[in-house]
Image: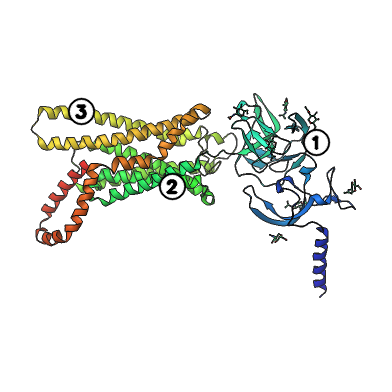
């Protein structure tokens, strides 16, 4: 009983402390407040926060914090005061005694070395240079805008920014004005020529590429087209040969790559960020490895009928081990480098950095050349070499055939080779040129003009699925195959009755398979 009274007393006491402060009616925006719990309370109800007197009407009890996306997160009830109505605030990322390094708060600031001055532009346009603690109020308990932040070094031409008196920040790079939800200030060690200086600079989140809707639409169309192409190549028996199977594997990898790109775009991978990053990388690498398999196989199968199915099965197994296995080795390497190498400023440029800035491998420094664009470039060069060699051979065979004009069968085979070659050549030119542009856009990413020009390449890249669909499925020969398939479905009942009798020797079967597969090589 005594205990009950005691608890009731506590509740009353709590209520008294927060008396006159309704949780419902907030005196100002959450991002204009600081936690004033523990400040001295004067007899007339005002609070003394450092040297600032806050009248009680500008304080309120909060049982939540507001996250940058506007959602509320419950925390223990605490008192907050609208200090920014009384004096200009500076929005810090974390406590001002902490450092910002690699986008994370850590360590502690050597206050004797810190340059404590911050430039703030007043409403009338004049720039006021003030001590961050004496002339401003640092707000240091607001939630961070995003997990991975990067700093704007205002001593550099491209990283200029302006902090306004009302708390907004304008970034000169793209003239974007950000509210206190989207940026924060924090001391950071910055290189200045030979020496480093310790200054308070602004930090903001990575810029998401602008046109999300356009990219989403193109990617979804690509995914649908890829799915249709894969289905067609699996359904039509005549396309289920070695070329076709390798092609389907390549398309599956491309499909998965696009899928992860789409999920990453809509930030749906945040719960399994690392898994998504490594899986996405795996599929991008295997797409390229399968491309190299196709160009190799195209050349080595030239002039040879793809008859013996045991051989093509064996080859397919070999190719699979190569493509899936090599991609696995690449992924294992970047995983190990990420996990075994210590993450500091010196090592970072050489780390793949999955999850550092996004759920994807870093693409803004030299590590991308090593782990992503370098291998891509090698495959593109390999493919180009294979295609030139194949072209030379095709021309040579054509000359031979002109001499021995009567060998009808070889001529037919040669024509089919040429067709297949032409088709894949178009594919490789599209893919090769496109991915080369991607590499170029990586190399010129600091040049604003070229970056904008090469955004077109991005769109072509995302629409590869659509291009492949039109190139490979809406072809006359494939459509004919479809027609045949549906016709044969209708008369299948009759055929199956008839074929009961003729299903005799294995030799006959083998013959049938041989002819069908050599026909098939003309189809793909
Ligand atoms: C507010 O400040 C008090 C005293 O410094 C601290 O105990 C409390 O955890 C803070 N509350 C929040 C939500 O930051
Ligand atoms: C509260 O008291 C302080 C000092 O005693 C005084 O400076 C302040 O103006 C008072 N505030 C109000 C709202 O009366
Ligand atoms: C915060 O306070 C409001 C109003 O008193 C109440 O409705 C809400 O449930 C509280 N939230 C938490 C998490 O305590
Ligand atoms: C503030 O601006 C002045 C001149 O406008 C400049 O010299 C100074 O370096 C700036 N201070 C900081 C901390 O950026
Ligand atoms: C702008 O306002 C500040 C204080 O409000 C004042 O000190 C300064 O002289 C003003 N500047 C101009 C150009 O009016
Ligand atoms: C703050 O002031 C700047 C410049 O005067 C203005 O562009 C911006 O919209 C203002 N922000 C808010 C939230 O009022
Ligand atoms: C930003 O605005 C300034 C002045 O309004 C203008 O000179 C500059 O070209 C703009 N920059 C961009 C990237 O739009």
Q: How packed is label 3: few (under 14 Cα within 10 Å), some, or many (20 or more)?
A: few
Q: Secondary structure at mark 3?
A: helix
Residue 439's x, y, as percent? 44, 31
Front position in the image: 298 or 72: 72
Q: Which residue is mark 1?
A: 135
Earlier sequence position, callout 2 versus callout 3 = 2
Position above or below: 382 against 249:
above
Q: Which residue is mark 3?
A: 395
Position above or below: 27 against 114:
below
Q: Specify whether residue 102 is in view.
A: no
Residue 114's x, y, as percent? 74, 33
Position above or below: 129 against 501:
above
Q: In the image as oriented, which residue stretches furthest toward the top?
A: 193
Kindly indicate the quadrant of the structure image that contains residue 193: top right
Q: Which residue is mark 2?
A: 259
Earlier sequence position, callout 2 versus callout 1 = 1
Q: Cα distance, mark 2 to mark 1?
A: 51 Å
């Amino acid at each position: 009983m005594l205990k009950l009274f005691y608890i009731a007393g506590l509740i009353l006491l709590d209520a008294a402390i927060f008396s006159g402060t309704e949780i419902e009616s907030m005196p100002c925006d959450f991002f204009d407040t600081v936690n004033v719990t523990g400040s001295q309370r004067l007899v007339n109800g005002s609070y003394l926060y450092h040297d600032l007197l806050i009248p009680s009407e500008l304080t309120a009890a909060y049982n939540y914090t507001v996250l940058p996306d506007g959602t509320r997160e419950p925390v223990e009830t605490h008192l907050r005061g609208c200090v920014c109505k009384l004096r200009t605030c500076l929005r810090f990322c974390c406590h001002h005694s902490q450092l910002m390094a690699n986008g994370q708060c850590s360590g502690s600031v050597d206050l004797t070395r810190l340059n404590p001055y911050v430039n703030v532009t007043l409403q009338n346009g004049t720039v006021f240079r003030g001590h961050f603690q004496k002339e401003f109020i640092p707000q240091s308990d607001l939630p961070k805008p995003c997990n991975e932040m990067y700093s704007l070094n205002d001593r550099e031409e491209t990283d200029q920014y302006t902090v306004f008196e009302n708390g907004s920040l304008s970034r000169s790079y793209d003239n974007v004005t950000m509210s206190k939800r989207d940026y924060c200030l924090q001391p950071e060690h910055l290189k200045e020529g030979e020496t480093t200086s310790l200054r308070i600079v602004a930090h903001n989140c990575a810029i998401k590429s602008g046109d999300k809707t356009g990219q989403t639409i193109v990617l979804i169309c690509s995914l649908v087209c890829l799915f249709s192409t894969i289905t067609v190549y699996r359904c039509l028996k005549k396309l289920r040969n070695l070329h076709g199977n390798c092609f389907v594997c390549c398309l599956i990898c491309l499909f998965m790559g696009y899928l992860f790109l789409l999920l990453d775009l809509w930030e749906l991978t945040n719960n399994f960020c690392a898994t998504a990053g490594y899986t996405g990388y795996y599929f991008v690498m295997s797409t390229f490895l399968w491309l190299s398999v196709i160009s190799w196989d195209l050349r080595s199968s030239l002039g040879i009928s793809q008859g013996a199915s045991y051989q093509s099965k064996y080859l397919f197994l070999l190719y699979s081990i190569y493509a899936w296995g090599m991609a696995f080795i690449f992924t294992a390497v970047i995983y190990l480098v990420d996990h075994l190498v210590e993450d500091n400023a010196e090592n970072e440029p050489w780390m793949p950095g999955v999850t550092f800035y996004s759920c994807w491998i870093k693409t803004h420094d030299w590590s991308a050349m090593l782990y992503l664009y370098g291998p891509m470039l090698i495959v593109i060069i390999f493919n180009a070499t294979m295609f030139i060699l194949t072209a030379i051979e095709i021309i040579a065979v054509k000359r031979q055939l002109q001499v021995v004009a009567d060998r009808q069968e070889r001529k037919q085979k040669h024509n089919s080779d040429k067709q297949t070659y032409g088709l894949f050549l178009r594919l490789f030119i599209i893919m090769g040129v496109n991915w080369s542009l991607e590499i170029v856009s990586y190399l010129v990413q600091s040049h604003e003009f070229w970056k904008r020009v090469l955004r077109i390449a991005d769109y072509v890249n995302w629409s590869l699925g659509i291009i492949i669909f039109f190139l490979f499925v809406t072809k006359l020969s494939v459509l004919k195959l479809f027609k045949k398939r549906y016709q044969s479905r209708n008369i299948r009942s009759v055929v199956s009755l008839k074929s009961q009798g003729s299903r005799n020797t294995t030799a006959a079967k083998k013959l049938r398979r041989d002819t069908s597969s050599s026909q098939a090589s003309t189809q793909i």
